[in-house]
Amino acid sequence: MLEEPEHVESQLLRNVVLQINYNAQHAELVQLRCEFLLQRNSWDKQQHKLQHANQQLSQALQQAGILNTHTQVQLHQAKLNNQYDALTLTLNRSAMLDRIGYAFSMAKRQQSQFALLFIDLNNFKPVNDQYGHEAGDKVLQQVSARLKAAVRDSDAVSRHGGDEFLLLLTDIKSDEDISAFADKLQHILAEPYQLGNRSVWLSASIGISVFPRDAATVSELIGCADAAMYRDKQHSKRRIG
């Protein structure tokens, strides 16, 4: 606890304030460094490091009397809300666009390729209409859990909107590998979904686009995968690009 300013020599008070400011700035640098590492490690590990940096920053600010615990919780929750879909806890649209943009940069630098899968659920609307929106939300949560369990730490899953999801697969080797993964994914998503004492069944249409072959921009890559998904839906045959 700092003594009241009137009981402290002016020079000593100045040194204390400078030290507090230094601590706050140092903690902020730690946070920025962890956010840089966020682009280098798996998403889950990165989030852990970012949370640790946030704690360090918050402690320094608390010492300076700038931030209280309630405000800290609010700021942390706001950061999570800016990155994740509240229902499915997958990346939201904005965060996924950032991840794809970073994948572009890395693929160009490393002369590698990556794939984007556009997934649309079939027969989801009848489930929503028959059992209600709460049941539909539970199905979407189960879908997202299956998708996250199916990908690697270096990949990413996002809810694109409604019953549509995007999967970012980094450092892919061949079209055959991507198609095999998409086939596996369709089987996983076709397994029954539990809603209390009842089960419902869905299927998924999947479109795939590959960078750099199919597109030169993020929007083109998403549009290409979207178009391939609709071809899969119409012809029951998935196509790449």
Image (cartoon, rainbow, N blue to C red):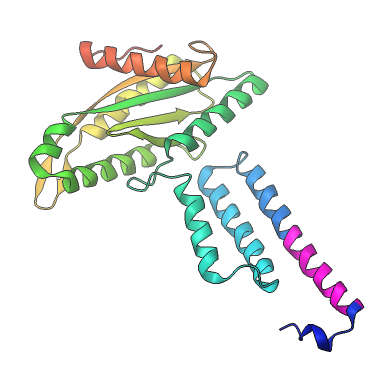
Residue 109, compared with residue 202, is above or below; it is above
Is 23 magenta? The answer is yes
User: Magenta span has 121?
Assistant: no
Tell me: 161 left or right of 195. Answer: right
Residue stretch rendered in magenta on the structure: 11-25
Position of residue 95 in the picture relative to residue 144 (left or right): right
Q: Is residue 239 above or below residue 149?
A: above
Regarding residue 176, the answer to whether it shows in the image is no
**Camera-side residue: 43 or 158?**
158
Q: Residue furthest bottom?
A: 7
Q: Where does the image place residue 24, in percent across and percent down from the top left?
A: 73, 62
For the point 38% across and 47% down, the residue is: 89
Q: Position of residue 191 (x, y in %)?
A: 20, 36
Quarter of image, res 104 = top right
Give the residue drawn at x 47%, y 28%. 169
The rendered magenta stretch, by its main secondary structure, is classed as: helix
Q: Is residue 92 visible?
A: yes
Name the residue at 42% across, 39% down: 92
Q: Position of residue 141 (x, y in %)?
A: 28, 45
Q: Is residue 142 left or right of residue 76?
A: left
- Percent across and percent down for residue 158 are 40, 36
